[in-house]
Amino acid sequence: QVQLQQWGAGLLKPSETLSLTCAVFGGSLGDHYWSWIRQPPGKGLEWIGEINHSGSTSYSPSLKSRVTMSVDTSKNQFSLKLTSVTAADTAVYFCARGGTSDSSNFYPEYFRHWGQGTLVTVSS
Amino acid sequence: DIVMTQSPDSLAVSLGERATINCKSSQSLFYNSNNKNYLAWYQQKPGQPPKLLIYWASIRESGVPDRFSGSGSGTDFTLTISSLQAEDVAVYYCQQYYSRPPWTFGQGTEVEIK
């Protein structure tokens, strides 16, 4: 059974960099894409981006200029960095498992497995 | 971006009654080559991550009670709870995985007991 466990700093000041990591247990990073999704307090879900085991990424256009994702296959982990945060970035951040890919194709999938969520608050 | 619009934003249903949530996408989520609709439904309770209920528009996830069902095709989809139970109080989201970036979600529908 795949489980995702995430962690990172929960309180940031404006202009700082958000940094979160998600570890995959019960399976490898494999051929899947691994996403970050956020949810501002009391609001809906926003997809941030995703990365696969080889480091291929896809980012939301609205956040692309500030987002960097990375992967560490030796630790079965992937990470998110979001620069120049403001109060608008205050949210619960989730990691999740998405679609798969092979050498020539991408196969989109729903998000079956999710991390527990990390509340990140940006405040001066 | 594919825009996902849910209706209503909230609904109150009596225990044992039917709850119906609609989701409309700004473009078709049906892929002709495999005859599938790239639409999922999630349930989220306070303090928890979303839980997958339905994928490919109508396939119930393992362990999900059969009172939950999904239907629709193309741009119009429905999640139905046939007999609302107290534990079904939650926010429900639809999500398209037809095209990215970005994957997009509906704004959510809050279901409560009348």
Image (cartoon, coloured by chain):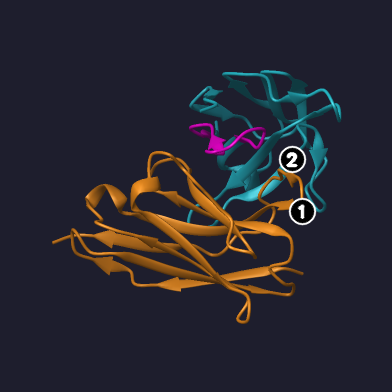
| Label ID, residue A103 | 1
Q: What residue span does the magenta drawing correspond to?
A: B95-110
Say whether mark 1 and mark 2 are on the same chain: no
Q: Residue under mark 1: which chain is it in? A: A
Chain that the image shows in cyan: B
Q: Residue under mark 2: which chain is it in? A: B
Q: In this view, does B5 lie to the left or right of A1?
A: left
Q: Position of residue A88 (x, y in %)?
A: 27, 47
Instruction: Judge whether residue B18 can be spotted in this image.
Output: no
Residue located at (72% from left, 33% from top)? B38
Residue located at (69% from left, 53% from top)? A112
**Amino acid, disc 1:** Ser
Query: Between residues B92 and A33, which one lies in front from this camera angle?
Result: A33
**Amino acid, disc 2:** Ile
Query: Between residues A65 and B59, which one lies in front from this camera angle?
Result: A65
Chain A's colour is orange
Q: Nearer the viewer, mark 2 or mark 1?
A: 1
